[in-house]
Amino acid sequence: MDELSALELVDLINSEDRAVAEAVGSQRLAIADAIELVVEAFRSGGRLIYVGAGTSGRLGVLDAAEMPPTFGTDPELVQGIIAGGREALVRSQEGAEDRPEEGVAEIDRMGIGPKDFVMGIATSGTTPFVHAALARARERGAHTGFILCTDPAPELLKTHDVVIAPLVGPEVVTGSTRMKAGTATKMVLNTITTGAMVVTGKVFGNLMVDLQATCEKLQDRGERILMTVLDVDRSRASNLLESAGGRVKIALVMGRRGVGVDEAGRLVEEAEGVLARVLGSPAEDAPA
């Protein structure tokens, strides 16, 4: 490998990466089970908590951090625990993954309980920090899951509510699990959280209607969603979004039902946040 040209390296890595999606697809049933467990946690007032070390931990924290701007969730709803703490996000904390007592302490610190779902991420399947955290979470009554990229041991399958194991095979650089294993992990996490957000009403059709217009990019996206669904011009969309306090879902109800912000909020709350229950299918009234 170290004698290949830059283009040959690109082709080699790309050829290995092509197997990742298939490996993730082989776990479709387990991933669907995980989505249902997350939805159950959300609907009971619980949280999704990721636990990992190194690349696995960073990917969990990243997925959690992307939920509030994308789906308008409370930052507490999806959270990530990484061995070594915040410093480990930007600089490797060697040895942190080998401290099980710290995994236990993190679960206690976050007050994990029966309503929560805790997902451990360890591509090798052996990280002591993660196993200890999950064991403590189960002691406290939480449901637990595990994501790894090796064959799961029978004991692992017996212990957790769901185990997801996309087998991506050896890395192109031996042991560098930031590559195929990391990509597979990111795909799994994307699918779990996106699926859970869709089921709990954060998406209308394929539009992220619970986003918060907190920056110019999201303001523009929110206005374009209103323009598409309501068939209005940019000015009308902007006014609706402003009246709704930047909440796209509320603005949509105001525009479609012709009600004020308080009534729109009440209708959305009664529908448990599922916009289709208030407006019907987006395809039903799509502009010609």
Image: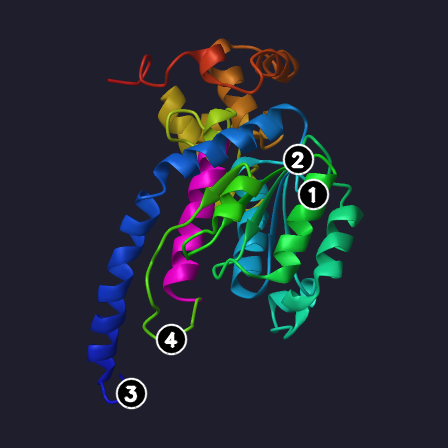
Query: Residue placed farthest to the bottom in the image?
Result: 3
Classify the position of the N terminus by image quarter: bottom left
Per the image, the residue denoted by label 1 is: 137
Q: Callout 4: few (<14), some (14-19), or many (20+) C-alpha neighbours within 10 Å?
A: few
The one of 128 and 112 positioned closer to us in this rendering: 128
State left or right for residue 249 relative to residue 105. left
**Residue type for callout 1:** Ala
Camera-nearest label, 1 or 3: 1
Most foreground residue, 64 or 156: 156
Q: Amino acid at mark 3?
A: Asp
Q: Earlier in the sequence, mark 3 or mark 2?
A: 3
Q: Residue beneath label 2, please?
A: 116
Q: Is residue 216 visible?
A: no
Q: Earlier in the sequence, mark 4 or mark 1?
A: 1
Q: Which residue is mark 3?
A: 2
Helix, strand or loop at label 4? It is: loop
Q: The C terminus is located in which quarter? A: top left
Task: State which region is magenta.
Answer: 178-196
Is mark 2 in CB contact (under 8 Å) with mark 4? no
Q: Main secondary structure of the magenta part?
A: helix
